[in-house]
Amino acid sequence: MEIGTITLFPEMFAALDYGIPRIAQAKNCLQLHYWNPRDYADDKHRTVDDTPYGGGPGMVMLAKPLQQAIAAGRKKLPKAKVIYLSPQGKRLTHKGIEQLRDAEQLILLCGRYEGVDERLITSEVDAEYSLGDFVLSGAELPAMVLIDAIARLLPNVLGDAQSAADDSFATGLLDWPHYTKPASIAGQNVPSVLLSGNHANIKRWRRQQALGRTYLRRPDLLANQALSKADQALLDEFLQQHVDVPKR
């Protein structure tokens, strides 16, 4: 997969030279490219922003340098959709990451200041995404988050593909609790079922914990699912162990 990014600060993306994105690039599963709008400014000061029409604080990114940077990106990545990362976009979910992962090429547009000229969005952007209901100083961090999330879902990147399949949200539920050595820490013991060697019981416990944890922390996720009789029984049993939690 190839991902290009339009950004004023390409040096920030050095963070992707670590962890899973580094592995994805080393395996040639992911190729990253960058275009700086300042390289397409038409004045000696390499101006990329100006004051907003109508007045008000802040600056707005100019359409022309961005448009030319995107054109350069499209020349390199002709099949790419342009994704604008902004607080006004559609909330990005695991399903959305999977859909973007399935694309051969993407171009990520990173805004700064008060954002970009709306006409650039209208004419050049294919989709607009947000990480959540908050504002950052620029879209470089969300772009890196998006690239990292995509990288770990690419084939042959993770050592065990089941890792991604069992993640929170991959099945519509939060992940179950995880434990490692030692078996006891300051009086807190690993649940005995995980030490039993009984894989059927372990699988049942993990499913129950995922259902219960989702109920407690993200009930909105369960509201979108029709639970099977088996899952409902597991959840009811979980809730009986949590007397302060009302049953569904």
Image (cartoon, rainbow, N blue to C red):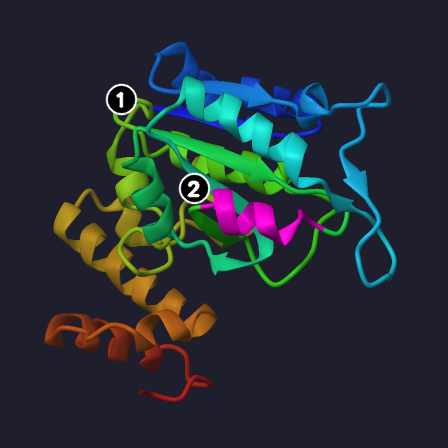
Q: Which residue is mark 2?
A: 183
Magenta residues? Answer: 115-125
Q: Position of residue 77 (x, y in %)?
A: 39, 23
Give the amino acid type for the residue marked by disc 1 in the picture.
Asn
Q: Main secondary structure of the magenta part?
A: helix
Q: Is residue 19 visible?
A: no
Q: Residues within 10 Å of mark 2 (few under 14, many from 20)?
A: some
In the image: residue 243, left or right of residue 7 = left
Which quadrant holds residue 241?
bottom left
Q: Which residue is mark 1?
A: 156
SS assignment at label 1: loop
Q: Nearer the viewer, mark 1 or mark 2?
A: 1
Give the amino acid type for the residue marked by disc 2 in the picture.
Ala
Q: Is residue 5 above or below residue 211?
A: above
Q: Position of residue 9 (x, y in %)?
A: 70, 26
Q: Tag 2 or tag 1, which sits nearer the N-term?
A: 1
The answer to whether residue 187 is magenta is no
Q: Is residue 241 above or below residue 115?
A: below
